[in-house]
Image (spheres, helix red, strand yellow):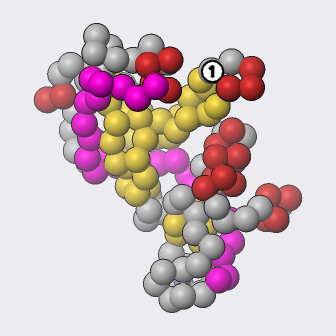
Amino acid sequence: MASIDREFTAASFYKFLNEHKLMGSRCRACGRTYLPPRPLCPECFREEMAWAEMSGRGRLLAFTAVHVAPTGMVAAGYGRDNPYCTGIVKLEEGPAISAQILGFDPKRPEGIKLGAPLKAVFLERGEGQARRTSLGFQP
Ligand SMILES: [Zn+2]
């Protein structure tokens, strides 16, 4: 795999995301997986990481509806009149990651169930040079 040469940094994580891959680093010594990737294992203090592609399957741990959106999300059409959900998803490989949560109505948060099974989706935003892939999850 050519990707094996990439450094275990957030920049590499986003580069993979642009390729529609959800990649973490897995410690070869103790087997723990980190997302975003880390070069050093905080459990066993070794630097023996390998890239590991996540399945994208996980469960909703926490969420919130966002009515005052940051600049990037305003550009994507979100804001006071069109809120969106963001949350923490625990991946089946172990790590938890924050991302936009789709497929629920942010105006009716009572319809959102903690523990709901979710699947990663890759969201394309922006045009030309500003084009980025963002991570989302949906049922
Ligand atoms: Zn380790």
Q: Is mark 1 within 8 Å of ligand 1?
A: no
Tell me the residue at 47%/48% (across/down).
57
Tell me the residue at 46%/25% (across/down).
71
Residue 58 horizontal side relative to residue 2, left or right = left
Check the picture and name the quadrant holding the N terminus: bottom right
Tell me the residue at 36%/25% (across/down).
69
**From where the camera sits, is residue 133 visible?**
yes
Q: How many other residues sit within 10 Å of disc 1, few (<14), some (14-19) or many (≥20)? A: few
Which residue, as the protein is rendered here, is positioned at the far top? 81
Q: How many discs appear?
A: 1
The segment highlighted magenta reads 47-71
1 inside magenta stretch: no
User: Which quarter of the picture shows residue 111?
Assistant: top left
Pick whichever, 133 or 93, lies toward us. 133
- Measured as percent of width and height from the top left, residue 76 is found at 49, 18
62 inside magenta stretch: yes
Which residue, as the protein is rendered here, is positioned at the far right? 2
Ligand 1 falls in which quarter? bottom right
Residue 105 horizontal side relative to residue 46, left or right = left
Q: Dot 1 lies on which element?
A: loop
**From where the camera sits, is residue 21 visible?**
no
Does residue 50 sit above or below 126 in this rendering? below
Name the kind of residue labelled 1 in the image.
Gly
Pick whichever, 30 or 82, lies toward us. 82
- Measured as percent of width and height from the top left, residue 73 is found at 45, 24
Residue 7 horizontal side relative to residue 87, left or right = right
User: Which quarter of the picture shows residue 108?
Assistant: top left
Which residue is label 1 attached to? Answer: 126
- Measured as percent of width and height from the top left, residue 64 is found at 25, 36
Specify the principal SS of the magenta part.
strand
- Measured as percent of width and height from the top left, residue 62 is found at 26, 47
Check the picture and name the quadrant holding the C terminus: top left
